[in-house]
Amino acid sequence: VIEIPRGPFMKTVTITTGIVLVAIGAVGYLLPSDASSVSAPPAAESATQLETGESAGPATKRSLTALIPAAVGALLLICGLVAAAKPTAAKHAMHVAVLFGLLGAIAATGRGVPSLIKLASGDPEANSRAVLFLVLMAIACWTFVVLAIRSFIQARRQRGAEAGGPSENR
């Protein structure tokens, strides 16, 4: 049984998970979706394309849904910072953070599993890049939720022991 330290541990985990999710979302949004758009030389552009600002080269398609991990990460980051700055609000901030983490985990898993199945079956419509970022988000969120729940259980047991009563084994 792994014992999770109390104190600033979960605040640090929350802030770190928030930063990781923001990075996943930023990378998913900012990196070109097609490798050829990075290495392909620009095609010759016509006068009409130059006037309108359109490019004849391959377009980099960016999807706002790629920012979903960043939104969940920003919420976790805010909760972690509130918990660190206001010790009296730490318990509430951490419970809200777990709620956001659980919602992110469920959303990523709910979207990722069917997409992973499509990818594994060889569906040409499957987006391997989207599946990668969904899996990364799911792993980060589920890890956070599990660590938080274990921390909550340990804190409750410790409060019971400090109060002199029997600790709960539920």
Image: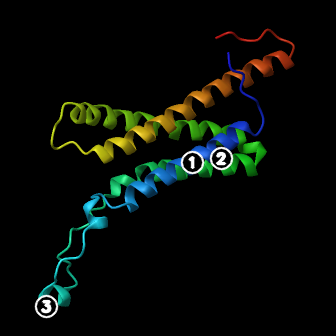
Question: Mark 2 or mark 3: which comes first in sequence?
Answer: 3
Please state which of residues 49 and 64 is positioned toward the viewer in this rendering: 49
Is residue 74 rendered to the left or right of residue 2?
left
Identity of the residue drawn at 17% across and 76% down: 56
Q: Please give the residue where the numbered disc 1 appears in the rendered image.
A: 18
Q: Are marks 1 and 2 in contact (CB under 8 Å)?
A: yes
Q: Which is closer to the viewer, label 1 or label 3?
A: 3
Task: Report the Cα–Cα distance between label 1 and label 2.
Answer: 8 Å
In which quadrant is the N terminus drawn? top right
Q: Say few, some or many: other residues with alpha carbon within 10 Å of mark 2 (under 14 / 14 to 19 / 20 or more).
A: many
Q: Which is closer to the viewer, label 2 or label 3?
A: 3
Q: Is residue 74 above or below residue 100?
A: below
Label at residue 47? 3
In which quadrant is the C terminus drawn? top right
Q: Is residue 121 above or below residue 168?
A: below
Q: Please give the residue where the numbered disc 2 appears in the rendered image.
A: 80
Q: Amino acid at mark 1?
A: Gly
Q: Secondary structure at mark 2?
A: helix
Task: Report the Cα–Cα distance between label 1 and label 3.
Answer: 46 Å
Q: Is residue 102 visible?
A: no
Q: Say few, some or many: other residues with alpha carbon within 10 Å of mark 1 (under 14 / 14 to 19 / 20 or more).
A: many
Please state which of residues 106 and 112 is positioned toward the viewer in this rendering: 112
Please state which of residues 162 and 39 is positioned toward the viewer in this rendering: 39
Q: Say few, some or many: other residues with alpha carbon within 10 Å of mark 3 (under 14 / 14 to 19 / 20 or more).
A: few
Label at residue 107? none
